[in-house]
Image (tube, rainbow, N blue to C red):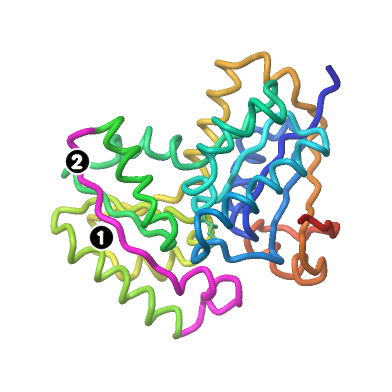
């Protein structure tokens, strides 16, 4: 079987914070990154819509040859992944695989907390799905999960306002709300791939004893372990160390913004997905 790149998908730019860690931990592989910027944000959209958009994007990456697609978006992982894995994959391409970001994160989350109270900051879609609560319970039944939806944070990041005073207002409000829900919270997880850009601001509103986690490193380590357990998939992934970027919206906008998330300048190609 011909070796092909690993597909990484997000509603927009957020997944680049995950891709950056994949490249850091697993630099030998080739990657195709697809940002569905034309239809972002996914956070406030219905289950049906997020499922339909995510399936279209996964199928596009499969059609490009990717044997493995990582849904590097919590909202899409929460709302669409299970249905795609259980209902669509056996029909579309039973040899291929689609993985998300919630399971690898919840597998590890209990190792970071001593008080057994964890706070989750996420989009409204992820919070409403209860995915973090349900998945954490499977691995760490004694850990209590408190959630806070932060509907303004993705728009602040997407509109390049994440360093401004408007961001302070919303970050302070949501962080205070979260800490008010669980008095013993000692670990706060950024359960949206956009939020690492707000990390400094979030840190400023958290007491020092609370650890702040982003998912990138956790998910990258988990992919490394996945390949150790699944050599049949590892051998289908090409290894030239290249990355190609695709966006469903303007390439000029994508290239201008993506550098902030990815840490390097990039050149994207436009694709139509519907
Ligand atoms: N980056 C996505 C996540 O991790 C959210 C962005 C969106 O709402 O589209 O949930």
Residue drawn at x 43%, y 53% as measured from the top left? 191
213 w.r.t. 67: above or below: below
Instruction: Tell me, yes or no, whether the two marked residues, 1 and 2, touch with CB atoms within 8 Å.
Output: no
Closest to the observer: 231 or 92? 92
Helix, strand or loop at label 2? It is: loop
Q: CA distance from mark 1 to mark 2?
A: 15 Å
Check if residue 145 falls in the magenta segment.
yes
Helix, strand or loop at label 1? It is: loop
Q: Position of residue 70 (x, y in %)?
A: 62, 39
Q: Residue furthest left?
A: 183
Check if residue 234 falls in the magenta segment.
no
Q: Which residue is mark 1?
A: 208
Residue drawn at x 72%, y 27% as measured from the top left? 93
Q: Position of residue 163 (x, y in %)?
A: 51, 77
Closest to the observer: 193 or 135? 135
Determine if the C-beta at disc 2 is less than 8 A from ligand 1.
no
Residue drawn at x 50%, y 37% as measured from the top left? 82
Q: Residue furthest bottom?
A: 165
Q: Which residues are the magenta region?
A: 141-165
Report whether 56 appears left or right of 98: right
Q: Mark 1, mark 2: which one is toward the viewer?
A: 2
173 w.r.t. 230: above or below: below
Q: Position of residue 204 (x, y in %)?
A: 34, 70
Give the quarter of the figure containing the C terminus. Answer: bottom right
Report whether 229 appears left or right of 60: left
* Label 2 CA crowd tier, 10 Å (few <14, some 14–19, many 20+): few
Give the quarter of the figure containing the N terminus. Answer: top right
Residue 107 - label: none
Q: Which residue is mark 2?
A: 114
* Label 1 CA crowd tier, 10 Å (few <14, some 14–19, many 20+): few
């Amino acid at each position: 079987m011909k070796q092909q790149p690993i597909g990484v998908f997000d509603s927009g730019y957020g997944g680049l914070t995950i891709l950056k860690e994949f490249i850091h931990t697993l630099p030998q592989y080739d990657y195709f990154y697809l940002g569905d910027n034309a239809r972002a944000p996914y956070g406030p959209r219905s289950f049906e819509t997020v499922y339909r958009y995510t399936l279209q994007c996964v199928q596009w990456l499969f059609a490009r040859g990717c044997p493995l697609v990582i849904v590097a978006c919590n909202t899409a992982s929460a709302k669409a992944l299970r249905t795609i894995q259980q209902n669509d994959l056996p029909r579309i391409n039973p040899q291929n695989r689609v993985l998300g970001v919630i399971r690898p994160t919840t597998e590890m989350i209990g190792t970071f907390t001593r008080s057994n109270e964890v706070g989750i900051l996420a989009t409204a879609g992820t919070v409403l799905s209860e995915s973090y609560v349900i998945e954490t319970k499977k691995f760490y039944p004694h850990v209590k999960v408190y959630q806070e939806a932060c509907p303004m944070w993705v728009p602040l990041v997407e509109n390049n306002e994440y360093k401004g005073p408007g961001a302070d207002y919303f970050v302070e409000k949501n962080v205070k709300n979260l800490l008010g829900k669980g008095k013993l919270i000692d670990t706060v997880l950024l359960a949206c791939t956009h939020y690492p850009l707000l990390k400094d601001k979030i840190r400023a509103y958290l007491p020092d004893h609370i650890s702040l986690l982003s998912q990138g490193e956790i998910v990258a380590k988990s992919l490394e372990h996945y390949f150790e357990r699944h050599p049949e998939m590892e051998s289908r992934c090409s290894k030239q160390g290249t990355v190609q970027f695709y966006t469903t919206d303007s390439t000029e906008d994508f290239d201008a913004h993506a550098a902030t998330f990815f840490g390097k300048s990039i050149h994207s190609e436009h694709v139509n997905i519907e």
